[in-house]
Amino acid sequence: MPVVAPTNSSTAQSGLMEVVSANGRRVIVGRDVDVEALLRIMRGLEALR
């Protein structure tokens, strides 16, 4: 299950967040991210073990 990692202040101020998968892959997205698309991407990254 992906988790949201703490970000530095410049990332937080820009409206970005970093999502880290269980296997350590990271994706940085904006506040207007399509959640369904992000979930598909994260599931695909998890499958690349």
Image: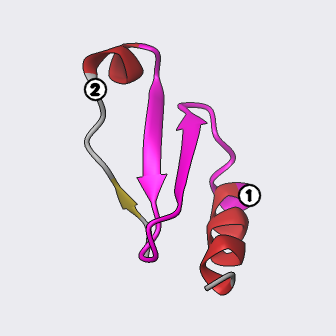
Whole-percent x, y for residue 1 in the image: 43, 77
Q: Which mark is residue 8?
A: 2
Pick the residue in front: 24 or 5: 24
**Residue identified by numbered label 1:** 37
Total labels: the figure holds 2
| Left or right side of 4 for 49 | right
Q: Residue at x 61, y 85 (%)?
A: 49
Q: Residue at x 62, y 67 (%)?
A: 42
Q: Are marks 2 and 1 in contact (CB under 8 Å)?
A: no
Quadrant of the rendered structure where residue 9 is?
Answer: top left
Q: How far separated are the C-alphas under marks 2 and 1?
A: 25 Å
**In the drawing, does residue 24 fall left or right of residue 48?**
left
Type of residue at label 2? Asn
Query: Is disc 2 placed on a helix, strand or loop?
Result: loop
On whether residue 20 falls in the magenta region, the answer is: yes
Residue 25 in percent (x, y) is at 52, 63
Q: Which residues are magenta?
A: 14-37
- Residue 37 sits above or below residue 47 on the image: above
Q: Position of residue 46 (x, y in %)?
A: 60, 79
Q: Residues within 10 Å of mark 2 (few under 14, many from 20)?
A: few
Q: Name the quadrant containing residue 6.
A: top left
Left or right of 6 on screen, residue 3? right
